[in-house]
Amino acid sequence: MTASTKQRVVVGLSGGVDSAVTAYLLKKQGHEVVGIFMKNWEDDDDSEYCSSNIDFVDAAAVADVIGIEIEHVNFAADYKDRVFAEFLREYQAGRTPNPDVLCNAEIKFKAFLDHAMRLGAEKIATGHYARVRQNATSGLHELLKGLDPSKDQSYFLHRLNQAQLSKTLFPVGELHKTEVRRIAEEIGLPNAKKKDSTGICFIGERPFREFLNRYISHAPGPIQDDRGRKLGQHVGLSFYTLGQRQGLGIGGVKEKGAQRGGGAHEPWFVARKDLEKNTLRVVQGHDHPWLLSHHLQAQDVSWCAGHAPAPGAYAAKTRYRQQDSACTLEAAEGGFALQFPDAQWAVTPGQSAVLYDGDVCLGGGVIATVDGLPQQAGSAPAAQAATTR
């Protein structure tokens, strides 16, 4: 590496193995690497579920082994204003938001990027499994899937724009997770065998309903099947999402569902939420028609190239860890529409519909309606004010 290609790169060190190996690889390439630990959540941060103090100790230990500086930066206020408040609004309105998508767009690649630039960084880097390349013909920066299909995180990054992509590096996106673990062990990183985090960024591994109960007003109401028969009582519509199977409290109901969905022993799934009637609708059987959709409309759209792709045939994901599904993109008022030849399961308003052209992630939007109807089966009443501690 020549002096002209050596860059000052600020790496988001989370305490996990992916960002640790990211920093190591950049340092090995000859870049001037600085680590930043982002503290995004302060409420009950000392709990057993989500302690950033432990993660910071791990990140500092990694920085020591690699031989780089690390700075602790508090973005909790930004996070609460830009991510958490929107998260609560969406849940209160009966939708199921994806806070990781918003966190990447508003914190990791906005607040963090701005902070890094103030530190004189030329690029930032994170441990995401994705890739960035500059198209030789158009000159545009493209977001690509990570090479490890089981770890690809481009879905969560689809809101990144040209300015953000041009400043971002994803070194582990070129690797498989097994190789990342091997490198970490080989160089003696203290977190080489640390378990991957699977919790939502600010909730951690804590019970989700218990967490949400502190912040969102709720009212119990009836659980009904597709024929209008009452099967039980829900604890508040905000606590359920489409396709949910566990925690419905109706597992013992058999005879009432025997005439629909393939038999009395088929499991129950959440299919609709009617906010006007405060009613949770459930159906029996994984492939019940209420759970299958061929069409969606999305709003709050963001395209990586800065403009919408041409209408036509693409592939899309309507939830993370889903296989790409063939679809047709059409323009629609306030966003775009997708038509799927194969029915999609439990398409959920509030989640992101993300569009792909092969390995290239084009962008996406927030699912607003499914098969032409709002999933709530009724307009939402004015959301009650969320309560905070």
Image (spheres, helix red, strand yellow):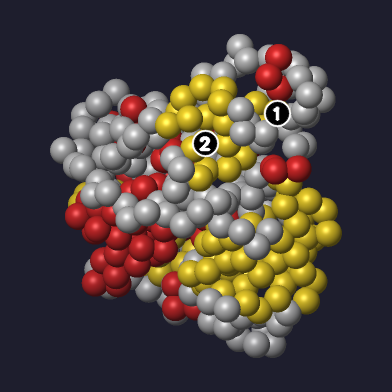
Tag 1 and tag 2, C-beta contact below 8 Å: no
Query: Who's the residue at 33% across and 37% down the image?
Result: 218
Q: In the figure, is residue 57 to the left or right of 151?
A: left
Q: For the view shown, which residue lies furthest in the top direction? A: 252
Q: Nearer the viewer, residue 121 or 301?
A: 301
Query: Who's the residue at 21% across and 29% down the image?
Result: 46
> SS for tag 1?
strand
As drawn, 330 above or below 226:
below
As drawn, 237 above or below 232:
below
Q: Residue type at mark 1?
A: Gln
The circle on residue 70 is none
Q: Position of residue 214 (x, y in %)?
A: 26, 34
Query: Who's the residue at 23% across and 49% down the image?
Result: 385
Query: Who's the residue at 52% across and 36% down the image?
Result: 280
Query: What residue is disc 1 on?
Result: 284
Q: Nearer the viewer, residue 211 or 147?
A: 211
Asked if residue 135 shows in the view, the reply is: yes
Q: Residue type at mark 2?
A: Leu
Query: What residue is disc 2 on?
Result: 280
Asked if residue 5 shows in the view, the reply is: no
